[in-house]
Image: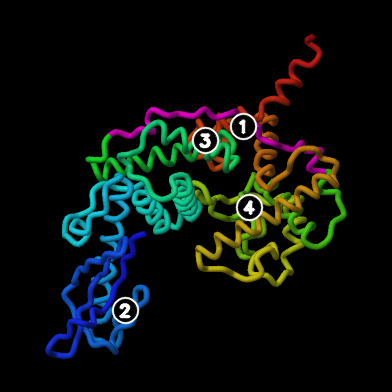
Amino acid sequence: MATVKVILKTHRKKDDGTFLVCIRISNEGKSRYKYIGYSVKPEQFKEGNGDWVRKHPDALYINSIAEDERSKIMEKITRLRLNNQPFDFDFLISDVPAQGHTFSEILDVIASRYHADSALTLYYRMISLKTQLREIFKGDILLNSITIEEIRRIDSFFRNEKKNTSNTVVRKIKHLRSAFREAQRMWPDIGQNPFEFFHPKSTPVNRAKLTPEQISEIEALSLMGVMDIYRDAFLFSYYTQGMRFGSVILIKRDQIQTMSLKYQMTKGLHFRELSLHPKLNRIISKYMPGKSPYLFPILKKEITNKRELHMAKNEANTVANACLKRIAILAGISEKVTFHVAKHSYAQMIKRAGVDPWIVKDSLGHTNFSTTEAYLKSLDNDQINEAITGLY
């Protein structure tokens, strides 16, 4: 196994008492060196990672150059391995750049963009995809070496190893297809996109939803503590036109006026002003006297760091769904109830009420009407069954 280390070559002392900083490449008992053009005294150098030169006026710059050269050599070693080429010291110490681009590179590029835009869910998806691809191929893989066979291998891994649903697999393959397209835009020489020829089929979504009667059963339960809080948060979502979990737990008291509640939707970023009604006011009044920074005492302190907030919301959502599972059992509801079911249930209710679909679109915060059509279509079965009752 090849090793690449930044070292101080102490057997070549210069007239000023310094020694050369260099990169040592070792493989199968042999070593070669690449010099970076700088020398320091022994007391100014310490072997390790990333912080080799210390107490030197140019320490930061020298360390930066050393790390850049070390990374380039490591990348070349990866390219040789991926292309099944023999180990080549001359190539490694030369200034000839490594050839080809890997999937990790483009996923890192896209992930960094999402991170910069604070789209943390998409950022973590890219990082997860990168990790899973490296697990599949036992390391990185060159973009121009991917064939339909490799994609079938990826598809099989998602389905059989990760136990992903068909729709999750479709979403992941779609992300990889888009990533390859972006790579083509950045590096035109990588060739055609094999993902364009692979389109796994999705399955129709069966969106769970509750009837107004089932919602009433949940309201009537006598609960305490965390169960009570998450029950009320779920009902709050239902009565605020399907407000998403992340928005519900971040609602602050100053967003609630006498007759309305104002907030910004997490998808589409539309600003909404919702009218308050008795059932919503009953929940709000219950938590208004609280001391937490938010209306619901789910997050105990205000979190401003976006990464920490993302993690805190995910953890709270896990607890919410665990509580709702128990609440559904207590209410005699056989359907699987998660927090998002509040949105499905609200959509079903207004659809049955005959509300104009374009108003439904704005109410649900959808950017495109086609999204609303697909969303409502998946809620059709009960209504169709009721309509044809007695026809046979």
Which mark lies nearer to you, 4 or 2?
2
Asked if the residue under mark 1 is in contact with the one under mark 4, i.e. CB atoms within 8 Å, the reply is no
Report the span colored magenta: 192-216
The amino acid on which the numbered mark 1 sits, given as a three-letter code, is: Val
Which mark lies nearer to you, 4 or 1?
1
Q: Which quarter of the rendering shows the N terminus?
A: bottom left
The structure residue drawn at horizontal position 48% and vertical position 40%, both measured from the top left corner, is: 172
Which mark lies nearer to you, 3 or 4?
3
Is the residue marked by circle 4 packed among few (<14), some (14-19), or many (20+) residues within 10 Å?
Answer: many
Q: Which residue is mark 4?
A: 245
The amino acid on which the numbered mark 4 sits, given as a three-letter code, is: Phe
Asked if the residue under mark 4 is in contact with the one under mark 3, i.e. CB atoms within 8 Å, the reply is no
* Dot 4 or dot 2, earlier in sequence: 2
Give the CA separation, mark 1 to mark 2. 55 Å
Q: Which residue is mark 2?
A: 52
* Dot 4 or dot 1, earlier in sequence: 1
Q: Which residue is mark 3?
A: 156
Is the residue marked by circle 2 packed among few (<14), some (14-19), or many (20+) residues within 10 Å?
Answer: many
Q: Which residue is mark 1?
A: 205
Left or right: 218 in relation to 276? right
The secondary element bearing badge 4 is classed as helix
The secondary element bearing badge 1 is classed as loop
Which mark lies nearer to you, 1 or 3?
3
Protein image colouring = rainbow
